[in-house]
Amino acid sequence: MALYREQNCNLEWSGTGLKYKLLALDMDGTLLNSNHEISPETEHWLRKAMAAGVHVCLSTGRNYNEAVPYGKQLGLETPMITVNGSEVWRTPHELYHRELFDYRLIGQMYEIARKMDVYFWAYAVEGLYKEDNWDPSLLERNQWLKFGYTTEDDELRHKINMELQNVNGLEITNSSPYNFEINPQGVNKASGTALVCDLLGIQMSEVVAVGDSLNDLAAIQAAGLGVAMGNAQLAVKENADVVTASNDDDGIALIIRDYILTEE
């Protein structure tokens, strides 16, 4: 596993014969810095990659409305993965595939939240639902995509995890050390990336997947090159092919420079 410590990536490139054709990017903690912005240097290198013919794909736990403004900033017209793979978009405005939760599983996870008295949230096609707007009558009517819990209490997270292990049909990950993100079993960023590969006519071996949290792990393990950010959780770093610089130090730019825009 390679580890980057170099910070200066203001180098020029020219070349042909790209090994990697798709760059699948997590957003929070990866594409976005601590100010939730795409840095000018990272944007510069992303645009260089796009100009060279590399497909850049946002691959995020966020929902569509939270992700699409960043795609617009970069001028992306390529496929996009949202809600950890529960939705795959052919273009930023055309849905290609959607995986929905059985509403009964959402009900079970909601009951765990009530039992544990923990903050929860749920994404549905119809919107974001939390304690302040939760309505049991919506359970069967809504099209559910993802459920989550957030707490900094380590013991409480352990108890929630134990409860979740008794529920079948769940894909359990996180987007920070303090939460759980739950999708339908088998739905993750790797399954989403595979669908994007089908759309683009490329192989998973031609993908670079970059992320920092457990919801990125499946894609990092399945991609031709799996990259962990310098700020990534330990389990992600341990399973990546490369550990780059942090999201505040243009880690994506380094990967584009040294692994993507290089001649075979």
Image (spheres, rainbow, N blue to C red):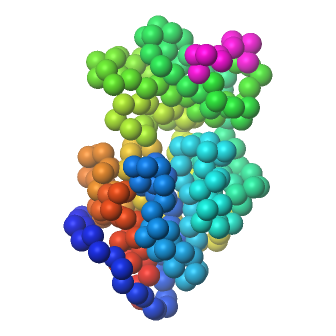
x, y percentage for residue 214?
A: 39, 43
Instruction: Give residue 238's position: percent from left, percent from top.
Output: 26, 52
Q: Is residue 34 magenta?
A: no
Q: Closer to the camera, 245 or 39?
A: 39
- Viewer-side residue, 248 vs 120: 248
Q: Which residue is drawn at 46% across and 74% down?
A: 45
Residue at x 41%, y 54% (from the top left corner)? 33
Where's the N terminus, which quadrant?
bottom left
**Residue at (38, 23) in percent of width and height:** 151
Residue depicted at x 71% and y 61%: 91
- Location of residue 218 with respect to 201 vertically, above or below: above
- Identify which residue, 167 or 103, lies in the foreground: 103
Q: Residue at the bottom extreme?
A: 15
Residue at the extreme top of the image, as rendered: 115
Main SS of the magenta part reads helix
Region of the chain picked out in magenta, as a range? 130-138
